[in-house]
Amino acid sequence: MEKFDALIVGGGAAGFFGAITAAQTRPGCRVLVVERGPQPLAKVRISGGGRCNVTHSCFEARALSGRYPRGGRALLSAFSRFQPSDTVRWFEERGVVLKTESDGRMFPTTDRSETITECLEREAAAAGVQVRIRCGAEALRPLSSGDGWEVALSGGRGGTVQAGRVLVATGGWRTGSLATMLADLGHEIVAPVPSLFTFHIEDEWVRELAGLAVPQAEASVRGTSLRETGPVLCTHWGLSGPAILRLSAWGARELHEMNYQFVLRVRWCSAQSDAEVLQVFQEMRQKHPGKAVANTPLFQLPARLWESLLKLADIPSSERWNRLSRNACLALCERLLRCELRVTGKSTNKDEFVTCGGVSLKQVDFKTMESRVCPRLYFAGEVLDLDGITGGFNFQAAWSTGWLAGRALAG
């Protein structure tokens, strides 16, 4: 029977980072990564539109922890030991320079996710980490001696191996054998539900605006306290963009309970109040009385969106500002500040799949990522009940928890 010092279940960002950290912390440490899929680091390869949003330029631990709808408090201690500045330094020491974009997201200067995956694979190989693809962990059994685990593997070379310590870092997952296995070992599994998704909207006028972006809008869910401000993007199926994705993250469980059927309220010009909007209308009537309302979009809104909102307010395209009635002004103001759209479902954000839910955080020691239920068993990344908003935060959680777990794996 093959024996390893550390076995990592899952070849994603957290798993690879944990494996590399363990092998580099204690040279000679025998580390095996098993990945059920056909290649490791699959999510890293597709993230950020193929550019890989490695982390975010939020370098203060408390502010950083506030970007996680679930797990922020637990991650605070992890970020005090390994945070975005450490991630930047780690990659730079290995020849990968990161750049910061205007919204704080950080990417490799090459704008290629392969830059990140090749770096990780190179470091793993140099440290002697073994990687087996199309190979999963089917059973975890503690050794009677209490100093490790017997792990039954499927696929690949299969068989059974022994490991002094095991790290579970399987990324986004729902239910199945892994959840059952961990529950049988005494872990509480918080039911996973999707996070970071886009909204399906049946209104044809929204779909006709596909590709159109509003830089600063406010989206909220009627009847709840859920509310986010930021860029909103119209798509062929509804709405996306940072404000929508953040709303989906903070409301992941609430929206799941609604079966993704709810009324979305959008303020297309989020900075203005009713009184301010009506005042601008009055000024247009005074300064440009003869101009067509349709030809003078306001509040820096795209012309096509402005025209659609006029139709919703039953204002003819030929209407002039000096003929616009008070009722018409009120109707247009309503569409600008409280545009209601019925959401009928969700879609995954591009090819990325993020879930909330997983192993209960109260059962994990965030100083080492070791299970409080099973000694010598560790967790990192999305297998835990933690998730961040869009912008590199989920990867940072993977690097931080993977690094902590890797240090502990090295013993």
Image (tube, rainbow, N blue to C red):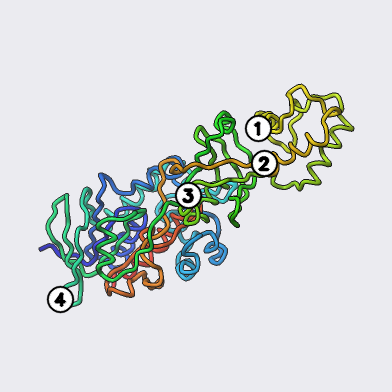
**Is the residue marked by circle 4 packed among few (<14), some (14-19), or many (20+) residues within 10 Å?**
few
**Is the residue marked by circle 1 packed among few (<14), some (14-19), or many (20+) residues within 10 Å?**
many
N-terminal label among 3 and 4:
4
Q: Residue at x 36, y 50 (%)?
A: 119
Q: CA distance from mark 2 to mark 1?
A: 9 Å
Q: Amino acid at mark 2?
A: Trp
Determine contact: label 4, label 2, CB under 8 Å: no
Where disc 1 sits, the SS reads helix
Q: CA distance from mark 3 to mark 2?
A: 21 Å
Where disc 3 sits, the SS reads loop
Q: Amino acid at mark 4?
A: Ser
Where disc 2 sits, the SS reads loop
Residue found at the very far left of the displayed protein: 1
Q: Amino acid at mark 3?
A: Leu
Residue found at the very far right of the displayed protein: 286
Q: Which residue is mark 4?
A: 144
- Mark 4 or 1, which is nearer the eye? 1
